[in-house]
Amino acid sequence: MMVKFGRISLKTAKIMPAVFLAAGMFLLTSCNGSQGEKSGSTVSIQKDGTILSHIEESFAQDYYDLEELRQAILVEAADFNKAAGSDKISVEKIEADEGVVTVRMTYREPLDYAAYNHVLFFAGMPADVPEEYELNVVLSGTKDNSQTIGKSDILSMEGYKLLVMNIQEPVYLDGRAEYASDNVAVSDNRKCAQVEGEGTGYVLYK
């Protein structure tokens, strides 16, 4: 049986628990709380436009092989960069401590994160959203949910960035969420957003 860690195929018995990997069930935090503190598996949009992925996964069994995991991740990242023709991904950290493995990777752009992980993930100017990312949505204000905007408003609002995602990890913004779709939870300080349940989430922030 093969399972996935990110986009990496690994043998269940040697590397990671299949029940977590097959379902994508990382050790997740949430955006609840006044400050949306970072812990568990998270994704962060950096000020320079890069994406920082911090993954935490149970790694408690004696027969799990950290070195095999490390080599698999490094090879997959190298193969992705080679195919892309440039360094789109850098692996910053792979280590295990107290039964938890931590992997930290930086992606040059949001669409690199999307391509590597086979997910929907865009963060940038609304006018730059790829055509395959559907924008026929209604967003509600994060400070006043009676205020709503639609596609034409999203595309015309200057000075805002749009996050489109279908991942379960909390995403830390390089700004504050002003509008969000109904399936997105936002922290009290509006710096963290997370899709609740299935589907694609949208956040307009600045």
Image: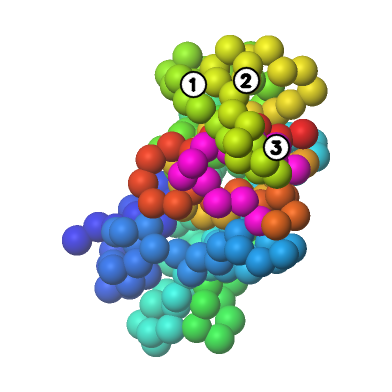
On the image, the x and y values in percent for residue 147 come to: 63, 32
Inspect this view and state whether residue 15 appears: yes
Image quadrant where residue 37 sits: bottom right
Q: Which residues are magenta?
A: 176-187
Residue 18 against residue 122 in the figure, above or below: below
In front of the other: 185 or 48: 185
In front of the other: 53 or 29: 29
In front of the other: 168 or 93: 168
On the image, the x and y values in percent for residue 7 come to: 41, 47
The disc, 2 or 1, on the residue closer to the chain's N-terminal end is 1
The disc, 3 or 1, on the residue closer to the chain's N-terminal end is 1
Inspect this view and state whether residue 54 appears: no
Callout 3 secondary element: strand
Q: Which residue is mark 1?
A: 135
Callout 2 secondary element: helix
Circle 1 residues within 10 Å: few <14, some 14–19, many ≥20? some
Callout 1 secondary element: loop
Amino acid type shown at disc 1: Leu
Could you give the CA–CA distance between mark 3 and mark 1, rounded to whole angstroms?
17 Å
Of the 4 image quadrants, the one containing the N terminus is bottom left
Instruction: Report the disc number at residue 154.
Output: 2
Q: Which residue is mark 3?
A: 178
The residue shown at (71%, 49%) is: 190
Residue 156 against residue 60 in the figure, above or below: above
